[in-house]
Amino acid sequence: MVVTHLLRGDKIMTVAEIMRTILVTVPMDYTIGHAREIMKKKYIRHLLVMEGSQLVGVITDRDIRTHLSPRIDTLSESIQDKATLETKIHHAMTRNPITVSPDTTIAGAANLILKYKIGCLPVIDRDGFTIGIVTDADFLRHLAQEDKEKEKE
């Protein structure tokens, strides 16, 4: 499937119009247990991993589930299972994630998510700073909002 364009009126929309700018970031030396708790509290699935002001990776809820013992939070949990919570993020994260600029078209960003089977794209400005994130949920939210607006007409 290839997305060719998403328009608002006659204007091709860009990532800047749907990205989230309140970012939740973590340093590389946090544990996956800590990242898991942040995701639960914030109701999010992606954390941007930073080294100073530089984006170095993304860690997802799926990355965390892959690296945790399947017995975590069960009656059969052991000390060894709990130890998996202490794994450092840098062992589980995706390094050098695919990124987009705020001027990337929504269709272009959607095609990257589909092509690489990823759930988010960090948004990087011309100076190399991370200024946002766009997720698969943001695309769905945008489409649902557009549908609501059409129903009102």
Image (spheres, rainbow, N blue to C red):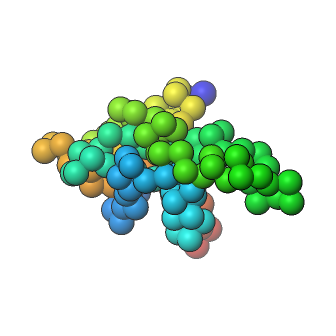
From this viewpoint, is residue 109 visible? no
Q: Position of residue 15 (x, y in %)?
A: 36, 49
Q: Nearer the viewer, residue 149 or 15?
A: 15
Residue lying farthest to the left in this orientation = 127
Q: Which residue is drawn at 35% across and 32% down?
A: 96
Q: Position of residue 3 (x, y in %)?
A: 51, 33
Indicate whether 54 appears above or below 76. above
Q: Where is residue 24 in the image (x, y as percent from the top left)?
A: 40, 61
User: Which image quarter: residue 107?
Assistant: top left
Number of marks drawn: 0
Q: Which residue is drawn at 52% across and 28% down?
A: 116
Q: Position of residue 62 (x, y in %)?
A: 62, 44
Residue lying farthest to the right in this orientation = 75
Q: Which residue is drawn at 77% across and 45% down?
A: 70
Q: Which residue is drawn at 51% across and 64% down?
A: 38
Q: Which of 152 and 137 is in front in this view?
A: 137
Left or right of 77? Residue 56 is: left
Residue lying farthest to the front in this orientation = 79
Quarter that holds the C terminus: bottom right
Left or right of 125? Residue 43 is: right
Q: Which of 52 and 148 is in front in this view?
A: 52
Quarter that holds the N terminus: top right
From this viewpoint, is residue 73 visible? yes
User: Which image quarter: residue 16?
Assistant: bottom left
